[in-house]
Image (spheres, coloured by chain):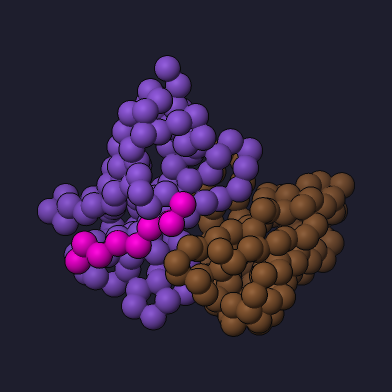
Chain colours: A brown, B purple
Amino acid sequence: DIQMTQSPSSLSASVGDRVTITCRASQSISNYLNWYQQKPGKAPKLLIYAASSLQSGVPSRFSGSGSGTDFTLTISSLQPEDFATYYCQQSYSTSSLTFGGGTKVEIK
Amino acid sequence: QVQLQESGPGLVKPSQTLSLTCTVSGDSISSGSYYWSWLRQHPEKGLEWIGYIHHTGSTHNNPSLKSRMTISVDRSKNQFSLELKSVTAADTAVYYCARDGGYPYGNNWFDPWGQGTLVTVSS
């Protein structure tokens, strides 16, 4: 399986901060990388697909970048509704689709 | 607006079979434009993909669960289902169904998701 490692596992930030979350793949996955947001008690929500494409309806303060093994999710100006856990997911290896361990974004 | 809804027992005894159904509204499984996936999330843990099915009946399963699982589709009811045999406490999780954008060229993203259903394995 391709292992996905997210960092940090948690972070504290204030409203208005720029937040960056990193996801690293154990091997090259081209741009087959998706990002999700999950709030407590809710299902995950797709934010970014194919590394950098914004899903319809997702605010433009969310952006994704990267290719190969290193990827980044950036929130340009953190809003109160953005406090959640974020997951990356690779779809390069369809033999087993795998997720990162998650990054919890908390209020400072 | 596409919506998915999981249904099934919330409690399953060890060694028995877990059976869940996902009902899709706002889209037709028979359109053939998507895969339809099952995923799960162990309590306070991360996400695990279980497997997907296409309306043709072709499936692809997580190798770690492959020997115990079956995914099927009922096009007449616009539903797809998961069966997981010989369950143990390690199968206790919130189970989600989701539309999977990986057909036909890959990049399997999941959107939207059902609300999820907690399945507890306990005697």
Q: Position of residue A106 (x, y in %)?
A: 78, 47
Viewport quadrant of the N terminus of chain B: bottom left
Q: Is residue A82 left or right of residue B93?
A: right
Say whether residue B44 is visible.
Answer: yes
Residue A4 falls in image quadrant: bottom right
User: Can residue A108 be found in the magenta stretch?
Assistant: no
Viewport quadrant of the C terminus of chain B: top left
Q: Position of residue A90 (x, y in %)?
A: 56, 68
Residue at 55% from the left image edge and 39% from the top image edge: B42
Q: Is residue A107 left or right of residue B109?
A: right
Q: In the rendered image of this protein, does residue A87 appear above or below residue B32? A: above
Residue at 39% from the left image edge and 80% from the top image edge: B105
Give the extent of the magenta segment.
B55-64
Q: Position of residue A44 (x, y in %)?
A: 54, 52
Residue at 42% from the left image edge and 49% from the top image edge: B65
User: Can residue B61 be found in the magenta stretch?
Assistant: yes
Instruction: Tell me which secondary structure the magenta stretch mostly adopts.
Output: loop
Q: Is residue A6 left or right of residue A2?
A: right
Q: In the rendered image of this protein, does residue B34 appear above or below residue A83? A: below
Residue at 84% from the left image edge and 50% from the top image edge: A12
**Can you name the residue that lies furthest to the top here?**
B123
